[in-house]
Image (cartoon, rainbow, N blue to C red):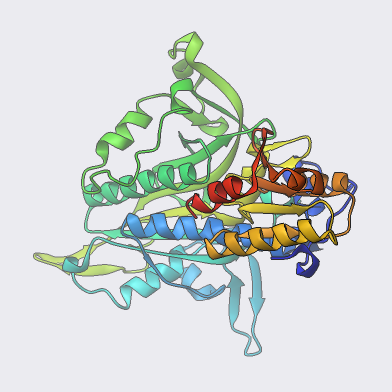
Amino acid sequence: MRLSRFFLPLLKENPSEAQIVSHRLMLRCGMIRQEAAGIYAWLPLGFKVLKKIEKIVEEEMARAGSIQLLMPTLQLADLWRESGRYEDYGQEMLRIKDRHEREMLYGPTNEEMITEIFRGTVKSYKDLPLNLYHIQWKFRDEQRPRFGVMRGREFLMKDAYSFDVDEAAARRSYNRMFTAYLNTFARMGLKAVPMRADTGPIGGDLSHEFIILADTGESAVFCHKDLVDMPAPGPDVDWENLQHVFDERTSLYAATEEMHNPDDFAKVPADKQLSARGIEVGHIFYFGEKYSKPMRAVVNGPDGEITVHMGSYGIGVSRLLGAIIEASHDDNGIIWPESVAPFDVALINLRPGDEACDAACEKAYKALNDAGRDVLYNDSDERPGAKFASMDLIGIPWQLIVGPKGLAEGNVELKNRATGERQTAPFDDVLAQLTAKKV
């Protein structure tokens, strides 16, 4: 994409309304624009990152055996009355009526709807286990939306739901999602720690939040230090036997502020105790028959009817974008992990109009695009310093810098945004290095 043809409304100054780093940088980079309190339009740069995060989530859900569908944003109030949650959910639920005076709501979550879909279509225990998920916009009418996409009213969420014949099978499904989440966040360059958590309005007696550590985190968290650098299980685990993955991590202390027990934490060796701030990026629940029993989600078993056991598993897709920025930035701007960066390479022409610079940039632009690399070609007439500042601000992992002095010697410059390291090398060598990288 040529910058001259791209929509990238950068801001030079920090917006006064933005209180945290991710909100400031997302506004300055032209990734989002506020349309109402806690409601944002996603501009092209932000939307590209959002889709890359979504793609990783989809790939890891498929690897774990979850099947994608799509449920509507609006739900009938009667479904929530069946489960008993309609009146209990509180003012965060946006309640509306259609022209026929039918009571509806803008879904904050989908336990009721997925249960209704299940009970109307699945009849035999032989069709279990089953795990269904979708990625859809949700709405929760926060009293004080703030911090940009970190605590907005409208947000994009991946929510999965498991159905099993009994508790033992349901816990195996829980372990699959537990493992899938560790792999998902690792692919995004995040070190996510699963922590015992409150179940809140979802319900149930088993719940974990996946927390990434950041100085600007919204809440205090407490854990064993070894959990932070524990590697993800990876894709080659035995998906039918994952209890060891769960046990390895839950055997070490980790809890959110609501679930923190100072006495238990004191048993952790002093040099392994970690108290920090954390950002929730995922939350999983096992809640048994909480919804299936009142809503009559049953299957035919060998000895009669079986009320299914359920769990739900959420990832804040839009929230992740802000969380990644909170965990990965410097004074100059965002430092995107390569897996979710909006572009792979920033191609910077230091002197547009110079015949040699233009020719070299066109050659690089074509070669990189042909190799499947996503390129932002800064072909603007800005001064070099302004170009460097804007490319650092939006955080593209690699900057290919083409200038007349270097080209006179056959060289270009390559900058690694994460480390700040620069290398000067022959043009063809640098181009070969960038085109050889995996997409």
Q: Is residue 198 above or below residue 160?
A: above
Q: Residue furthest bottom?
A: 100
The residue at 48%/28% (across/down) is: 228
Instruction: Decide if residue 153 is in sight here.
Output: no
User: Viewed as shown, does residue 250 lie left or right of 351?
Assistant: left
x and y, in percent, of residue 261 in the image: 49, 23
Q: Quadrant of residue 60?
A: bottom left
State the residue in front, 147 or 59.
59
Tell me what residue is drawn at x 77 percent, y 41 percent. 20
Q: Position of residue 30 (x, y in %)?
A: 78, 58
Vertical side of 400 occupied by 112: above or below: below
Instruction: Give percent across and percent down for residue 145.
Output: 74, 52
Where, quadrant-wise, is the N terminus in this rendering?
A: bottom right
Closer to us: 230 or 270: 230
Residue that lies at the very extreme toward the front in this rendered image: 409
Spot the residue most to the left: 302
Q: Quadrant of residue 43?
A: bottom right
The spot of residue 217 in percent (x, y) is 65, 35
Looking at the rendered structure, the number of numbered marks drawn on it comes to 0
- Residue name at image x 16 percent, y 67 percent: 126
Relative to residue 153, is residue 400 depicted above or below? Answer: above
Q: Is residue 402 left or right of residue 73?
A: right
Residue at the spot 79% in from the left edge and 48% down from the top edge: 403
Q: Is residue 308 above or below residue 182?
A: below
Q: Is residue 128 visible?
A: yes
Left or right of 128: which side holds 50? right
